[in-house]
Image (cartoon, helix red, strand yellow):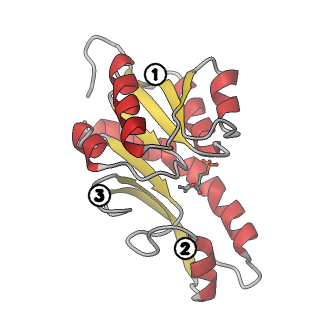
Amino acid sequence: MEKLDGKKIKICVFISGRGTNLKSLINFSKQKKNKIEITLVISNKRNAKGLYFAKKNNIKFTIVNYKNKKNAETRILKILNQNHIELICLAGFMKILSKRIIKKYKNKILNIHPSLLPRYKGLNTHKRVIENKEAFTGCTVHLVNSKLDSGKIIIQKKIKVLKKDNVKSLSKRLLKVENQIYPKALKKFISTSL
Ligand code: GRF
């Protein structure tokens, strides 16, 4: 998606909570010579802390009520279309997108997951990693397909699990790495796959 007209790639970031990965993607978009624009933020939670970063940076945001998933996704597709969104970055979005959206944005949806996929798909990764006494864990940015946490891997980074680690300390340390690799993965994806 190298744009000859100099226009930036319009990205929508989906969040449900804290938004540190959103923040790091926004910071990346502000760097000189980058080719992306965070055009829109969608949250399924009205009180998601991450919305602060959208507000602070004058980025349009929308809250989508998920009481009825079908209606929620119809609304999402409409908003994405209205805003000419070309790429989606899931960043702590706690809802599973249905095939309808995944098909429409085939190979155009990225996600960040706090484990070394294909290991530890799903929730509570750190707890399971510690219980299993793993020596290493990590994080993965991958494409989203219709199987949970199973799409093509773009970037992965490994870290050591320390003997003294608990869920809190491990997730805190890994989050910093997540915030570093998401922009890198996006850059790599744009330059190699679009
Ligand atoms: C991250 O750990 C991410 O890997 C997972 O959800 C968390 C989101 O964190 N999918 P934040 O909201 O970006 O701070």
Residue marked by disc 1: 33
Of discs 1 and 3, which sits in the foreground? 3
* Disc marking residue 61: none
Q: Quadrant of residue 104?
A: top left
Task: Report x, y in % for residue 93.
Answer: 52, 48
Residue 14's spot in the image, x, y percent?
Answer: 50, 39
On the image, which quarter does residue 103 sit in?
top left
Q: Secondary structure at mark 3?
A: loop
User: Which residue is denoted by mark 2 in the rendering?
Assistant: 137
Q: Earlier in the sequence, mark 1 or mark 3?
A: 1
Alpha-carbon span between mark 1 and mark 3: 27 Å
The amino acid sitting under disc 1 is Lys
Mark 3 — residue? Answer: 152
Q: Considering only vertical position in the picture, is 165 above or below 179? A: below
Query: Of marks 3 and 2, which one's residue comes earlier in the chain?
Result: 2
CA distance separating discs 1 and 2: 33 Å
Residue 158 in sight from this viewpoint: no
Residue 128 rendering spot, x and y as whole percentages:
57, 80
- Which amino acid is tagged 2? Thr
Name the kind of residue labelled 3 in the image: Lys
SS for dot 1: loop
